[in-house]
Image (spheres, rainbow, N blue to C red):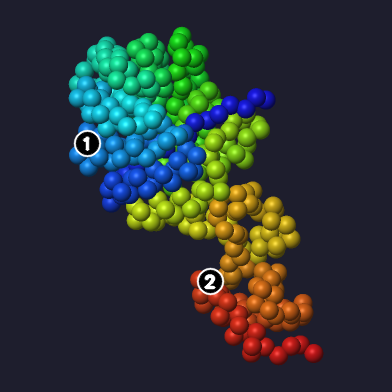
Amino acid sequence: MSQNPIYIFDTTLRDGEQVPGCKLNTKEKVELALALEDLGVDIIEAGFPISSPGDFASVEAVSKVIKNAIVCGLTRAVEKDIDVAANALKYAVRPRIHTGIGSSDIHIKHKFNTTREDILVRAAKATKYARNLVGDVEFFAEDAGRADNGFLARLIETVIAAGATVVNIPDTTGYCLPHQYGEKIAYLVNNVPNIDKAIISCHCHNDLGLATANSIAGAIAGARQIECTINGIGERAGNTSLEEVVMVIKQHEKSLGLYTNVKTQKLNPVSMLVSDTMRMPVQPNKAIVGGNAFSHSSGIHQDGFLKEAITYEIINPEEVGAGGSKIVLTARSGRSALAHRFHKLGYEFTRNDIDVLYQQFLQVADKKKEVEDADLLLLAKAYSPVE
Ligand code: KIV
Ligand code: ZN
């Protein structure tokens, strides 16, 4: 099967930064943008330039330092927004304007109090206007996840005719099931006559915990760009997590026929940088970058892992820059993990010794969340070997 690229569009600095408490100043945005470029993302959405003078300055500063990635600025489908974004992006080597409007009847009625026909006119106008200012224009059909597919196809056909180079199909409210989102992308591939003139992009939110699955379903159906954030941060339950989609694609590269340009060894360092800069902790059980992503604590798993890591790890932690695997000792741990830890601490006990020590270990473990090396040293020192 031939390999197709999936372009990684990082929106940590725009959709991710919208999270309460995560606002970034210009210096922080520049530092993170450089780290994202170093990670190998293809597009950096640096901000929403008209939203505040500070964000304008940030998009401008990011545009000046980024040399390889495309730098993108968000706008509404409004000429003033587009002018301001083009101005903020004027130093970018590869500028992109990301403009768009609501596409579901819910948004058309309640947000815009207008008609589908008027949305088509506004979308075409904004896209043409942006294309006169930059050569790369991405159009977002907001709330496409809940939009009527027939209307969505007309909208996408219209904006491609108006000059859109990328068409973004956001599941803004994280509503779709993976097969529904995949079918939506397939519908566009099969029903928009000029679809091959643009790249289709997935932009999924995580309200039902399906953002990664939906993005992958979109890519399987023909999308070639995925919009995502480091650690999956973003409005409400967040956006598609960059590290998850990148590693899904890497793990299943052959069967999917897809690849990304991300340097996966940098995933954990960048995750930590984003978490520290935004003061937004990563949940311990988060895939790929969570503190427990490579920890083993139950006896059955530890025994298998110690015999051969592949029994319980599908990813080598070094491949994602995670340091190493951890064996955590708890009351659910078994004898092999205990013997292994004693060995690391410099004690070689016989099987009979371990049987006795294991009972003592359980007494300690039942009273604690995790047994520390200091606890084991006390047990080892107090222990008289079985004769
Ligand atoms: O979720 C969404 O629809 C968005 C658009 C502005 C692209 O973030
Ligand atoms: Zn979004």
Question: Which residue is denoted by mark 2 in the rendering?
Answer: 370
Q: What kind of residue is marked 2?
A: Glu
Q: Does the numbered disc 2 mark a residue whose Cβ is under 8 Å from ligand 2?
A: no
Image height check: is 346 above or below 309?
A: below
Q: What kind of residue is marked 1?
A: Ser
Foreground residue among 42 and 303: 42
Residue at disc 1, secondary structure: helix
Tell me what residue is drawn at x 32 percent, y 17 percent: 131
| Quarter of the image where the C terminus is located | bottom right
Q: Measured from the top left, where is residue 287 in percent x and y?
A: 52, 49
Dividing the picture into quadrants, the one containing residue 384 is bottom right
Residues at badges 1 and 2 in contact (C-beta under 8 Å)? no
Q: Measured from the top left, where is residue 244 in percent x and y?
A: 51, 43
Tell me what residue is drawn at x 60 percent, y 60 percent: 325
The CA distance from mark 1 to mark 2 is 47 Å
Mark sitting on residue 51? 1
